Image: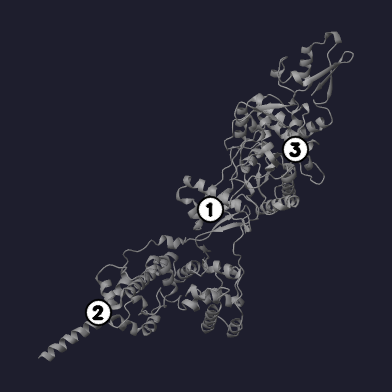
Amino acid sequence: MRNNRTARVAFRILAGIVLLPVAFAIGTAFYVNFNRADLPDLDGFIRFEPPTMGHVYDANGHILVELGRERRDIVRYDQIPDVMRDAVLSAEDENFFSHSGVDYSVFLRLLAKTNIRALVAHFSPFGSEDASLRPPVFPQGGSTITQQLVRGYFLQKLCSTKSSRSLQHDGVLPHVLAFVIGVPGTNKLLLKIEEIRLSLWIEGEMRKQYGSKRRAKEEIFARYASFVYLGNGRYGFAAASDYYFHQPLETFTVDDADKAALLAGIPKSPGEYAPTADDIQKPLHRRNQILALMVTNHFLPAEVAQRLKLAPIRLAAHSIEPVVEAPAAVETALEELQRLAPNHGSELGIDQLLEGRIQVYSTVDHRIQDIANAALESGLKVYEKRHPHTEGLIQGSVVVLRNIDSAILAETGGREVYNGRSNTYSDYNRATQSKRQPGSAMKPFVYLAAFRRGTLDLDTSVPDEPISVPGANGRTVKWIANFDNQFKGMIPARQALAESRNAAAIWIAKQIGIDSVLRTAQDVGIRTRLQPYVTTALGASEVTLLELANAYRLMAGGMPGEPHIIDKIQHVRGDVVYSYQWPCCANDNSFALSMIQEGLRGVVRIPSGTAHALDSHAFPIPVMGKTGTTNSYRDALFVGSTFGPNGITVAVRIGFDDNRSLGARETGALAALPVFREIMLKVYQDKLAGPVPVFPADIESNIDAYLNGDLPGKEQELSLGSPDAIKLADVEAAACRLSAKVLPATTCEPQSILLRPIYRQTNEGGRIVFTNE
């Protein structure tokens, strides 16, 4: 009787041991095929917007920089060449197009490889106490392409903790399984079950979405080909092909089957099979295995496979530090993107760019950028020849703007290689971050302020005479000197501007008030707060090169607007989520603006002008502009433009980062102007900015008249009647009639501070010879 009872107990235990796995298998089958609770959102998977590469493009679609947390390129099924598809199917899932997400034919093969010893060791008291050191009970592999995609797309968190010694699932069943096969084994088994459930569900939903099993499979394959990790930070076969071979994936042919097989072999274990210059044997062996499988699956002729097995693996070379063509421009684009983000919700931002959800299209023209980079390098090298001890230390910056809308066409924030390393977009941008004194490049704002007030015009005489300004402590005075340490007395304003006479600029600033100068500077685009001291008229306050360039751009073209570098931003969906809106289209055609344009054109055309070197047959581009040299020759600048809305503006600054002196006589005309000249010449020679604009005929003719002695500043005759009738008031009235542009009528008063010192008369037999000095 006792033996029968023991036999029944043993039978029940044995039946339980047999039936429990059967019940578990039945329950699992029901769960994976029919349980559709707690499913993830499929909309994102159908749209398929995984993190990719964000790009900043130039105006012509040329890539300025690639950015991303994951370097990935999305491909459609029809963009994947046949040889790449065949290699992937051979390596990963030869029955992909026939199964429904899970290939049950591999299950028996995998069960046959179950590690019985590892299972027994789990219960053995003599086994290792550290379960992490035990071999796995179940073999790896057997996942279909769909399962691999599901695992990477939906189950990343569970995948990252599958080997954890902490149970990742709640409930009685996970704890029972953990007792039988261990915690890591349970985590892996339940992960596999969830992977199968989602794979079957997704394939069914994709068939509904795309209308056929074949189309659904093609979409799943394309997602896998774009999503899979292939080592060295590359995701997807397109990104990997570019990285490992510098060859576009879509160009693969049968003769590239060795490359396709190499790429197809990496997903199994990127750490082992991603090729490097130091480790090529394992990737080579894996590649040849896949070539053999391609022959077995009738994807590749045996003779082709045999030939390609003998081919060495040739990897593309990679620089240690990637060179960015326009690092300063890229940095400005990223900063502008950050400023735009708050007004556009979650559509815009650096994170969206780094995930490749948006692409930025800039106003930069990489051809102009290359010219600016080369011109700056050339200018710095010429400076270094004059000062060999400064080699590699001198720095500079360049900005090129389009006059009509202030679009940044090029921006160079420093030399290409500095302190032994290439410039990057995270470096110091001297075009936007460096605030330095503009020197005499500030003077045009003084003259423009006076023109706007009607205080003087270009042919008004101004005193180039000794003049003082308050000292720093307010009790002493500082006497202003000119660059040549000479004074010329009363000279026309156009000459004072062309020759950059310091004394004249200070005198004008005193007459109109420094507040007027500051307001004018702000109106034309200077955004940095300027100091309310009269020496600001000579450039004593600091500004950035970009805002200085924009101010000259407005003076050249008359168009309002702030500098911008982003033209549009496009979402990965294809819709444009931001586009630059031009400011008010009305340009400033005021008389004051035309006078400053004529004055800055005179800086080039008048022989004594500081930029007269640009008035030559070797430089057939009519430009206007102004040099700038700061105290002790610390910075040299030139900012100039071609005329009107259709022109461009180029600003150049040369100087040391530590603000040391450039050296005696290193002026804007010597150090910075040649860089400007080279940029302008090559841009227009290469037809990158349209036809060369010409200045209005009246501007050129007025300068011609001045040069020919036909405008005030040269001797003019006035007929005032008999010598006995000549009175001072008559002379002053005649002076006002001399030219419609000399002075506004409101200033033609006998005691006018501007009029009284500007003339000299001689009586020559009833004729007054009036000289406006």
Residue 61 lies, in percent from the top left, at 61, 56
How packed mark 2 is, by other alpha carbons closer than 10 Å (few <14, some 14-19, many 20 or more), is few
Q: What residue type is labelled 3?
A: Phe
Disc 1 on helix, strand or loop? strand
Report which residue position mark 2 lands on.
Answer: 20
Q: Nearer the viewer, residue 144 or 531?
A: 531
> Are the two marked residues, 1 and 3, in contact with CB atoms closer than 8 angstroms?
no
Q: Which of 285 and 365 is in front in this view?
A: 285
Disc 3 on helix, strand or loop? loop
Q: Which amino acid does label 1 sit on?
A: Gln
Q: Which of 114 and 118 is in front in this view?
A: 118
The quadrant in which the N terminus is found is bottom left
Alpha-carbon distance for marks 1 and 2? 56 Å
- Left or right: residue 562 versus residue 678 is left
Q: How is the image coloured?
A: one colour
Q: In this view, does 186 lie above or below 39?
A: below
Q: Is residue 630 visible in this depiction of the protein?
A: no
Alpha-carbon distance for marks 3 and 2? 94 Å
Q: Residue at x 59, y 33 (%)?
A: 531
Residue 217 lies, in percent from the top left, at 46, 71
Q: Is residue 443 visible in this depiction of the protein?
A: yes
Sequence-first disc among 1 and 2: 2
Report which residue position mark 1 lands on.
Answer: 570
Which residue lies most toward the right here? 765
- Left or right: residue 145 versus residue 430 is left
Q: Residue at x 79, y 41 (%)?
A: 615
Q: Nearer the viewer, residue 250 or 626?
A: 626
> Are the two marked residues, 1 and 2, in contact with CB atoms closer than 8 angstroms?
no
Alpha-carbon distance for marks 1 and 3? 39 Å
How packed mark 1 is, by other alpha carbons closer than 10 Å (few <14, some 14-19, many 20 or more), is some
- Left or right: residue 196 versus residue 674 is left
Report which residue position mark 3 lands on.
Answer: 695
